[in-house]
Image (cartoon, helix red, strand yellow):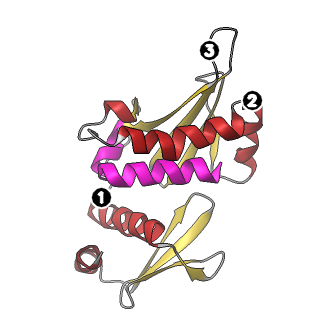
Amino acid sequence: MQKSWEELRGLSARKTATVKFLADEYQADLEKEKVFSLSCNVLAKDFTAILVIHYLIQASRGLPELSGEWVSFKELSGIEGYYAAFRKRSIEPVLRKYGKDPEAMLSVLERLPGRKASEGDVGVIIEAFPSVPAMVLLWKADEEFGPEASILFDRSISRVFCTEDIVVLAGMVASAL
């Protein structure tokens, strides 16, 4: 993480940087090398801090434009060996929580930045970070199959985060739902 702090300091003359992430706002103190949740006034957990720092690094360089093309985790390059962790951290929690009542997922829009999606039986697009949307889709169970879920990203996500960060981000989106 030290390398990321150094990189961020090299890209920014500011002493602090603030960013919205899901339903919270975080402030990175570049001198103290700490990330704080502004809503709770506590230190962010390490995995959250890493995502915030990596996002701020990319934002300082310039975020890629959204492509408008939604892709699944399996469609991203460099994901070999990560899909099991992705499914366990993101898809399975969504299915446990909303598999029997997919419509209930729409209530997250009351507390998370996002909007209803037209894809799937039920879907939401959550603005995880500015210009980093995640589309969470649910399909209802039928006579033959159980419920299924998917989390899609704008194709540009691979120019913002590495594969490990995308797995963590998807898990945090799922947890926030």
How far separated are the C-alphas under marks 1 and 3? 43 Å
Q: Nearer the viewer, residue 177 or 68?
A: 177
Q: Residue at x 70, y 8 (%)?
A: 143
172 inside magenta stretch = yes
Q: Residue furthest top?
A: 143
Q: Residue at x 31, y 48 (%)?
A: 163
Q: Look at the magenta stretch and give its main secondary structure.
A: helix
Q: Nearer the viewer, residue 148 or 132?
A: 148
Please give the label number shown on residue 100.
Answer: 2
Q: Residue 120 at what x, y percent from top left? A: 60, 22
Kindly identify which residue carries mark 3.
Answer: 145
Q: Nearer the viewer, residue 147 or 16?
A: 147
What amino acid type is highlighted by mark number 3?
Phe
**In this view, the mark in front (1 or 3):** 3
Helix, strand or loop under label 1: loop
Q: Residue at x 52, y 75 (%)?
A: 44
Q: Is residue 72 visible?
A: yes
Highlighted magenta segment, given as a residue range: 155-177
Res. 22 image quadrant: bottom right
In the rendered view, would you say 97 is above or below 121?
below
In the rendered view, would you say 104 is above or below 36?
above
Tell me, yes or no, whether the two marked residues, 3 and 2, touch with CB atoms within 8 Å. Answer: no
Helix, strand or loop under label 3: loop
